[in-house]
Amino acid sequence: MRIVIKIGSNVLTRPDGKLDVTRMSALVDQVAWLRQQGHEVVLVSSGAVACGRNELKVEHALDSVEQRQLFSALGQVKLIGLYYDLFREFGIHVGQVLTMKENFEPGEQFENQRACMRVMLENGVLPIVNENDTVSVTELMFTDNDELSGLIAQMVEADTLILLSNIDGIYTGHPDEPQSELIRSVAPGTDLSTYIQTSKSAHGRGGMKSKYTTASQVQAAGIRVIIANGERENILIDLIRHPETTPHTTFITA
Ligand code: GLU
């Protein structure tokens, strides 16, 4: 299987905003396991801005674009450096792909981006993708990395897209309410919009709404999408080995 895994900022950051290296390391172990099982993996990792925010005390107030540019520049280096070190323990080569929405318009840039993904995968290199936040123009950005990961999954013709956030999946009500139930399986064409909470988590740009939008589009393209909780221990391995006892929402394909 070719699997695209999106790791959200909230999965990688502690409540105080610092990078959660323990969790990152556990996820890397699981990705290494997936590769040992013969799966091809592409990671879409957020966390650059969250990672960079804690690196520097800024003297003067920065506007939102300056903050994004400065913190993503600082944070992306740290993020990819850590991935490099962690994956090297398994002898896995990682490659950094920083991209922008323009690269997904049909035409030469799309072909170029796809060729880049292909040559990395053919050579066993694990692509770690993020938006090029330093130079992206605000109006032209991806809504968030959920959207980006959906486009990547379609570009590489993945079998499965796994969206890891800090919630088990889509519920029939507010996740904190006891009567709410986790929706395990979503058939193509099902409209779940009444169940989607619009609140967002602390560190990322996305939320359940954008996960749902991405999941529906990617499902319509014939790719299975799984929304699961990246804060659960062994989540990636459990999703493959014990899907029936592992909480998640799957958008199944026909
Ligand atoms: N590209 C942003 C980052 O790495 C994350 C965007 C998102 O939260 O989806 O910080």
Image (cartoon, rainbow, N blue to C red):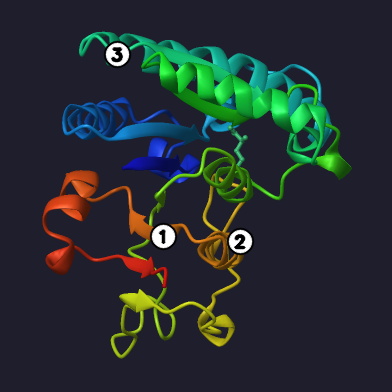
The residue singled out by tag 2 in the image is 210
Q: Secondary structure at mark 2?
A: helix
Rendering coords of residue 149 (x, y %): 55, 44
Q: Amino acid at mark 1?
A: Arg
Between circles 2 and 1, the one closer to the viewer is: 1
Rendering coords of residue 85 (x, y %): 32, 9
Q: Earlier in the sequence, mark 3 or mark 1?
A: 3
Q: Secondary structure at mark 3?
A: loop
Q: Residue at x 72, y 44 (%)?
A: 142
Rendering coords of residue 76 (x, y %): 56, 19
How many labels sit on residues?
3
Rendering coords of residue 152 (x, y %): 57, 40
Between circles 3 and 1, the one closer to the viewer is: 1
Asked whether, in this view, residue 191 is left or right of residue 139, the answer is left
Q: Residue at x 30, y 91 (%)?
A: 179
The residue singled out by tag 1 in the image is 224
The residue singled out by tag 3 in the image is 92
Q: Quadrant of residue 236?
A: top left
Q: Amino acid at mark 3?
A: Ile
Q: Residue at x 59, y 26 (%)?
A: 53
Q: Earlier in the sequence, mark 2 or mark 1?
A: 2
Label 1 crowd bin: few (<14), some (14–19), many (20+), radius 10 Å:
many
Q: Is residue 190 visible?
A: yes
Instruction: Name the foreground residue: 181 vs 184.
Output: 184
Q: Secondary structure at mark 1?
A: strand
Looking at the image, residue 244 lies above or below residue 183: above
Q: Is residue 14 visible?
A: no
Q: Amino acid at mark 2?
A: Ser
